[in-house]
Amino acid sequence: MASNSSSSRFPLMTMLFSLFLILGIALYVVLYQGTTVINLKPHMRAIGSMFIAPPPPKPKPVKRVTYYNRPPWISQHVFDTCDDRCEMISSSNYKNSDAVVFHAPDIHMGTPLRKYRGQTWVFHAMEPPFLIPSFKNWKRLFNWTLSYRRDADLFNPYSTFTRRKDVGNKDTQHIIRWENKTRNLGWIVSHCGIESQRLKYVEKLKQTIDVDAFGRCGKLHCPRGQWQECLERYKFYASFENALCIDYITEKSFRVFERNVDSIPVTRGAPDYSMFLPPGSFVNTRNFSSSRNLGTFLKRLSDDKPTFMTYFKWRHYYKAEDQIDSKMGFCELCRRLHNPTQKYRRLYEDIDEWLRQGSLPRRSCRPVIDII
Ligand SMILES: *[C@@H]1O[C@H](CO)[C@@H](O)[C@H](O)[C@H]1NC(C)=O
Ligand SMILES: *[C@@H]1O[C@H](CO)[C@@H](O)[C@H](O)[C@H]1NC(C)=O
Ligand SMILES: *[C@@H]1O[C@H](CO)[C@@H](O)[C@H](O)[C@H]1NC(C)=O
């Protein structure tokens, strides 16, 4: 009897033990969820996934940015192609934004807007200082500057050069029609540039070399949208800025690089052009002690086809890309909002001081001294 009863109790114990074991494993799998499933061997993982759904991927956070007075040339979708996620939210809701951008040339407010806790305020200016109203009352509000100036927090020049992916590809090498180059210096200008006195400079230059001026400041007419055709006959292109200010090079100067126009740019402005343009691709008026020396140099170059051609060599290696839509600056803004570190923390005591650089000799614009 005794042996009989003990033999019948054994299977019961085994069954109970197995039941606890299975419950234990199930509990373990449930408690440790995803991590266990990932560590399991492939054939086990298939069993595991029957019970547990993989955790959903964490959505990347979106930073909210308000462009308070967005000009038409800045798209509402300016962040769409950035690596980090930012969304543009309306001005009426700027209170809830992480960052607020102001288009400085169009802000005419005596008293500043209210700044909410933790917000990053951005001063956006692509115009020279004399076209920007006073910000004397906006003390200790702006964190970052977005501008063509190299010392801006978010640097965005009008154009940038990048190395070509197709270096050496014969198909991209374009033929310069020397036989078409019958004129010397071409200038296309719609406003005369009072600040830089470029009209006066050209008058002086005309004493040594022929200059053809198209547009409102000249005698010739170039049909709208045909500036490339108008320049075809010219060996040189006058890239004279309307203002002589730090780092200020506009699209008027860059566009001959972007469109591969076969005229050598002759630059006149305040920047250190070697920081922006490829070496050997331009002639700088500042390199000459007088307009007469410049004229003589250009005349000599206009008769020297082999040297003339060397000014276009850069094209085999680089290409110029328009940055006017400011995506470059805005994507960097978005990136910094997502990566706040001590080195990006900043607050401008007086943004006007940054803009105008106060008194001499740190003036942000140069006086005209080359009309000799
Ligand atoms: C340039 O040259 C080509 C051929 O040599 C000619 O067809 C074209 O009309 C010329 N353009 C100008 C503006 O002279
Ligand atoms: C400026 O002058 C120097 C010395 O003559 C010359 O090497 C350089 O290429 C010139 N640069 C430009 C942009 O004209
Ligand atoms: C921007 O300025 C505010 C003070 O107005 C400050 O609290 C915040 O930390 C600053 N942000 C950055 C990125 O410097």
Image (cartoon, grey):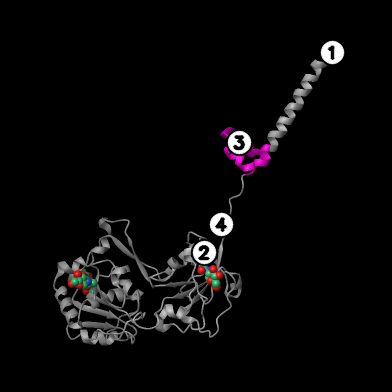
Q: Residue at left 75%, top 23%? A: 14
- Quarter of image, res 157: bottom left
Q: Which residue is mark 4?
A: 60
Magenta region, residue range: 28-53
Q: Which residue is mark 2?
A: 337
- Ligand 2, seen in the image, is in the quarter at bottom left
Q: Residue at left 19%, top 73%? A: 181
Q: Give the distance between the C-alpha atoms of the residues marked 2 and 4, in whole angstroms.
A: 13 Å
Q: Evaluate if marks 4 and 1 touch, with contact meaning CB atoms under 8 Å apart.
A: no
Kindly state the secondary structure of the residue where label 1 is placed. Answer: helix
Kindly state the secondary structure of the residue where label 2 is placed. Answer: helix
Q: Amino acid at mark 4?
A: Lys
Which disc number belongs to residue 321?
A: none
Q: Earlier in the sequence, mark 3 or mark 2?
A: 3
Residue 130, given in percent of the width and then of the height, sits at: 40, 84
Observer-nearest of 21 and 257: 21
Q: Give the distance between the C-alpha atoms of the residues marked 1 and 3, in whole angstroms.
A: 47 Å
Q: Which residue is mark 1?
A: 2
Observer-nearest of 200 and 269: 269
Ligand 3 near label 3 (Cβ, under 8 Å)? no
Query: Would you call the spot at circle 4 few (<14 residues within 10 Å), some (14-19), or many (20 or more)?
Result: few
Q: Give the distance between the C-alpha atoms of the residues marked 1 and 2, in whole angstroms.
A: 80 Å
Q: Amino acid at mark 3?
A: Ala
Q: Evaluate if marks 2 and 4 touch, with contact meaning CB atoms under 8 Å apart.
A: no
Residue 8, given in percent of the width and then of the height, sits at: 81, 17
Whether residue 205 appears in magenta in the rendering, the answer is: no
Closest to the camera, between mark 1 and mark 3, is: 1
Kindly state the secondary structure of the residue where label 4 is placed. Answer: loop
In this orientation, does residue 333 appear?
Answer: yes
